[in-house]
């Protein structure tokens, strides 16, 4: 496949991945702070759906197009900036995978509370705090990846 087509797909999928991630995080953050139970249920359900439809394919497309571009451009895994990107991508992935699981659990807890017309299980607050902490790690990591990919300069 042509390098410029790969690069376009790579950039667009990164924008989708980070954009939907940031948007979902913002909506969930706000719903958790100021929303009622029904709003939390709706937002958590939408965040799970958006992750499956948009974020997951982008997470798969990123390393595939990145690897193909790396090969075509003559870069290797020995390049320090690429090593930084790979380690950060793994770090972000290690934060994102539990976030997906937590989002599913949060959505289920809100659905149960709405369906049974009861208060939200207190474990939801624990999930919320862990979800936010992992989100900060993931978002910071992706911003560092954007910097490295743009400048081709290693951070360490």
Image: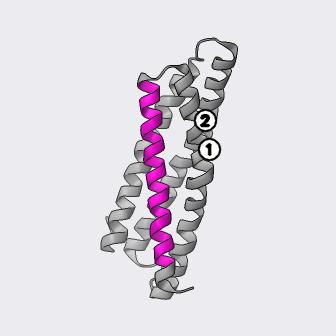
Asked whether the viewer can see residue 141, the reply is yes
Report how far apart the C-alphas of labels 1 and 2 lie in the structure.
Answer: 6 Å
The circle on residue 75 is none
Q: Is residue 17 magenta?
A: yes
Q: Which residue is mark 2?
A: 45
Q: Are marks 1 and 2 in contact (CB under 8 Å)?
A: yes
Front in this rendered view, residue 69 or 26: 26
Asked which quadrant contains residue 58, the reply is bottom right
| Residue 9 % position (x, y) | 51, 72
Q: Quadrant of the C terminus?
A: bottom left
Asked whether the viewer can see residue 153, the reply is no
Residue shown at 40%/66% (left/top)? 84
Residue shown at 44%/45% (left/top)? 23
Residue shown at 42%/73% (left/top)? 82
Dot 2: few (<14), some (14–19), or many (≥20) neighbours within 10 Å?
A: some
| Residue 94 % position (x, y) | 54, 51
Q: Is residue 21 magenta?
A: yes
114 left or right, relative to 85 = right
State whether residue 145 is above or below residue 48: below
Asked which quadrant contains residue 106, the reply is top right
Front in this rendered view, residue 108 or 16: 16
State whether residue 59 is above or below residue 135: below
Q: Which residue is mark 1?
A: 49
Secondary structure that dominates the magenta span: helix
| Residue 20 % position (x, y) | 48, 50
Start-end of magenta stretch: 6-33
Residue shown at 44%/53% (left/top)? 19
| Residue 146 % position (x, y) | 37, 63
């Amino acid at each position: 496949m042509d390098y410029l087509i790969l690069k376009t797909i790579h950039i667009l999928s990164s924008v989708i991945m980070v954009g939907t991630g940031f948007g979902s995080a913002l909506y969930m953050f706000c719903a958790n702070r100021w929303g009622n139970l029904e709003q939390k249920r709706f937002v958590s359900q939408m965040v799970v759906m958006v992750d499956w439809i948009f974020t997951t394919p982008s997470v798969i497309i990123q390393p595939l197009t990145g690897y193909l571009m790396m090969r075509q451009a003559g870069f290797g895994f020995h390049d320090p900036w690429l090593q930084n990107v790979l380690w950060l991508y793994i770090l972000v992935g290690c934060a994102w995978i539990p976030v997906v699981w937590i989002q599913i659990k949060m959505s289920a807890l809100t659905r149960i509370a709405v369906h049974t017309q009861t208060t939200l299980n207190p474990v939801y607050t624990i999930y919320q705090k862990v979800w936010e902490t992992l989100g900060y790690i993931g978002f910071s990591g992706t911003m560092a990846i954007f910097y490295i990919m743009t400048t081709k300069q290693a951070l360490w």
